[in-house]
Amino acid sequence: MTESTLLPDLLRERAASEPDRIAMIVDGRGSMSYGDWETRSNVIARNLIQRGVAVGDRVATFFENAEWLDFAAAYFGVLKAGATAVPLSSRFTGRELTSIVDRCAAVGVIWGAQKPQAPGWMATVTELERGESGETFQIPVGPDSVAEVLYTSGTTGLSKGVACRHVHAVRPLMDASWPPTWWRACAAGVSVHANAISTAAGQLRLVEPLGPLRMTTLALPVFDPGRLCNLLAENAAAVVQLVPSMAISILDTGAEREHDLAAVRVVSMGCAPLPTPLIPRLSAAFANARLVNLYELTEARHAGTALLYDGAHAGSVGTPRGATQVRVTDEVGTEVPPGVVGEIRLRWPGVPPQHYFRDAAATASVFVDGWTRTGDAGYLDETGYLHLVDRLKDVIIKGGLTIGSLEVENVLCEHTAVADCAVFGFPDRVHGENVAAAVVLHRPVAIRDLRDFLHSRLAPHKIPTRFLELDELPRNRAGKVVKSQLRERIPA
């Protein structure tokens, strides 16, 4: 790989060296080799050119999680045509979908089993795989060309399109310090996941087979703890990719006890910090595996941190991954000392920040002086480990005292009756804000018992004054809890 390497170059090189090796499997739907992936995407690219797609045009792809194989072929076909892919799925509602396609000015949509309602031309993968050569094809573009526009979850309003250049996706794969030695032991193994198409985690799984470890990804279209554990055992999988809600579901159902998970070497966590009380249970469930937490976000998916759980830094999200640099700053961007809470900022030196597509104002507020403002509150400790406190918008200020929801959530999760929880602030006439908690329970428990439990572990001002008991927490497409929906349930 060189400084000018594009994503399709990675696929072409892998297909030339290992054409018959399986790159991707979808449970119940089949598999695709590197050679097939290369050929299919070449045919699609030529057909897109015949349709008039030009360099830099946006082409939306609309696929469900059972259609990873067609999505992967279509996505790389778009890139080989010199265009920009806009991954979408039915997780975007009809009105939101139309808005996104309009705002990114997509010239057309490639769709799978479900035809969306959107402007521009429509074509299926089947239609785009007819009548053209599968020989190597690439419309020339540069590494700074936009490869994709990925729309965020939109938890605080209209979803924003994060533009990712080829260099953002390729450069981390070229870094000599990543992956670390303990992850390289998984080389050429199977990595099982249930990440969704059209999310940042899903896009990472898409390019994972093209990385130095040559992993075969096995996608589970719909997450089910028993089925996931069964796939891990059947395929002697080396890696499993989880989000905290999935880990909780596996442990709560006892699915890990029904299958032999001895082959798993890495349990990779993302999306949100794993509640600290669950770490010993997850370690016991995957006895031969290393637990690693990855701190990443859509706006900086080329940069982030990683924590290998070793018992010493369980409350942290780790240290910089690869060439990532981390700063914690005050509200005007001045770096604060270790131990002081501020806003977390990330960058990968030599790689320009990403940007919001066609949104100069939002870009200027988030991507500042080469750094990406994460919107997360946290601090660096004296040893350089990064600790999350909360989303800045979710930090609770009660009577002038700052409360981080993660601290309260971690303590709540220690209670044996609590399966899942979310802590959030709500308006209070006296204190400005007060603390509330939504809980999902294993078994019935009196609220006073939960309060007594918290009082023995937290300062009084951090104890929730309101509790919501729910069957499940509201989550967005990325699996993150939508706290704005919880706030709406607290009466004024």
Image (cartoon, helix red, strand yellow):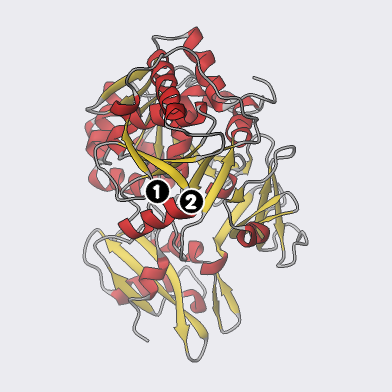
Residue 83 numbered mark, or none: none
The quadrant the N terminus occupies is top right
> For the residue carrying disc 1, how many other residues have a C-alpha within 10 Å: few (<14), some (14-19), or many (20+)?
some
| Left or right side of 88 for 54 | right
Kindly indicate the quadrant of the structure image that contains residue 279: top left
Element class at badge 1: helix
Q: Is residue 424 above or below residue 323?
A: below
Tell me which amino acid carries mark 2: Pro
In the rendered image, is residue 349 in sight?
yes
Tell me which amino acid carries mark 1: Pro
Asked whether 248 or 109 is in front, the reply is: 109
Q: Residue at x 60, y 39 (%)?
A: 302
* Label 1 sits on residue: 244
Residue 273 numbered mark, or none: 2
Q: Residue at x 40, y 80 (%)?
A: 465
Q: Position of residue 77 (x, y in %)?
A: 44, 27
Dot 1 and dot 2 residues touching (CB under 8 Å): yes
Alpha carbon distance from label 1 to label 2 = 7 Å
The quadrant the C terminus occupies is bottom left
Q: Position of residue 203 (x, y in %)?
A: 46, 37
Q: Position of residue 239 (x, y in %)?
A: 42, 28
Q: Position of residue 408 (x, y in %)?
A: 46, 66
Kindly indicate the quadrant of the structure image that contains residue 4: top right
Point out the tag, 1 or 2, that comes first from the N-terminus. 1
